[in-house]
């Protein structure tokens, strides 16, 4: 998404980027330290009646929102369809541009359990937050882990909590939308829950590959109309997958022309 010329000149030079990135990383560490005991308290208090761990997860995502507020290099926004019932479970899917997608999508006002690679669960404090929030661990290339992750996703849906997946499997290296894998769409059809597509635009350069510094970035996540899966069978997986990919691709292209 385009950034204003004035803002780019003010914040986008090498000195400003370095200084503000140091500030942003420092603040992220401080926020994580503050957030961990807060989420722990919510986890302890709500465990007896919140089997889906909705509220610890909801608070955890707000960490990303607060960090964006204190990071002057980023401006994130949301748009699109309003989800009236946050406890109606969806299989949420989005295109994947960068690590910053997590910070952007967390601005949406309802809780989702994220399917995340194993490495994130090993990070100090962050891994604890993910476990308390009942996020779903995935070991890439491990078939048993994939089966276990899909079972875990089904359990979250059964407990009236949405799950969040990137059907590309990994972020795009060249900015082009990758091919979607079947998993999310098979999960939606087999569980009988609707797909909720998200279109993400603008995060690709928020954290450049190979550089620890943030970039001046304006990004948006747009919620598209849910797609019901009632009556579908596994024979419809490919059709549903390609339909959703086309919708997201078209919306991302539109968002880039609107900016």
Image: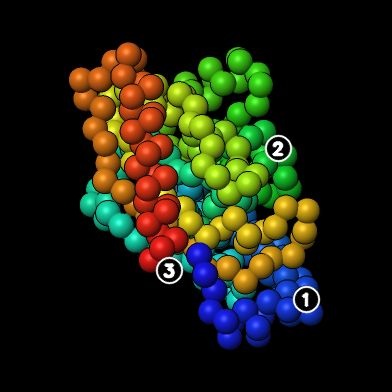
How far is disc 1 from disc 3 in space, using C-alphas?
A: 25 Å
Q: Which residue is mark 1?
A: 14
The answer to which of 222 and 113 lies nearer the viewer is 222
Numbered badge on residue 72: none
How far is disc 1 from disc 2 in space, using C-alphas?
A: 30 Å
The answer to which of 25 and 235 lies nearer the viewer is 235
What residue do we see at 38% from left, 30% from top? Answer: 242
Task: Determine whether, in the image, residue 203 is placed left or right of residue 199.
Answer: right
Marks 1/3 in contact by CB < 8 Å: the verdict is no
Query: Tag 1's secondary structure?
Result: helix
Q: Earlier in the sequence, mark 2 or mark 3?
A: 2
Residue 202 vs 182, above or below: the answer is below
Frontmost of labels 2 and 3 is 3
Q: Is residue 109 visible?
A: no
Q: Which residue is mark 2?
A: 119
Q: Is residue 56 visible?
A: yes
Q: Position of residue 251 (x, y in %)?
A: 37, 51
Residue 52 vs 186, above or below: the answer is below
Residue 136, quarter of the rendered image: top right
Q: Mark 2: few, some, or many residues within 10 Å (few <14, many ≥20)?
A: few
Numbered badge on residue 259: 3
């Amino acid at each position: 998404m385009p950034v204003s010329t004035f803002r780019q000149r003010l914040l986008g030079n090498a000195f400003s980027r370095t200084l503000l990135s140091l500030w942003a990383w420092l603040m992220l560490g401080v926020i994580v330290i503050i957030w961990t005991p807060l989420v722990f308290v919510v986890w302890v208090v709500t465990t007896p009646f919140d089997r889906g761990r909705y509220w610890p997860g909801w608070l955890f995502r707000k960490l990303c929102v607060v960090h964006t507020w204190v990071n002057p290099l980023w401006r994130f926004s949301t748009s699109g369809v309003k989800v009236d019932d946050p406890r109606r479970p969806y299989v949420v899917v989005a295109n994947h541009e960068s690590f910053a997608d997590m910070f952007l999508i967390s601005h949406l006002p309802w809780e989702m359990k994220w399917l995340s690679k194993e490495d994130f669960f090993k990070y100090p404090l962050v891994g604890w937050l993910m476990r308390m929030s009942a996020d779903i661990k995935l070991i890439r290339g491990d078939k048993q882990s994939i089966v276990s992750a899909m079972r875990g996703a089904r359990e979250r849906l059964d407990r009236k909590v949405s799950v969040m997946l990137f059907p590309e499997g990994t972020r795009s290296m060249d900015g082009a939308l990758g091919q979607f894998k079947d998993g999310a769409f098979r999960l939606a059809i087999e569980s009988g829950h609707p797909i909720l597509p998200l279109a993400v635009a603008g995060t690709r350069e928020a954290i450049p590959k190979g550089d620890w510094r943030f970039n001046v970035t304006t990004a948006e996540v747009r919620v598209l109309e849910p797609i019901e899966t009632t009556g579908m069978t596994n024979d419809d997986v490919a059709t549903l997958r390609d339909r959703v990919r086309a919708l997201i691709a078209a919306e991302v292209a539109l968002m880039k022309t609107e900016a």
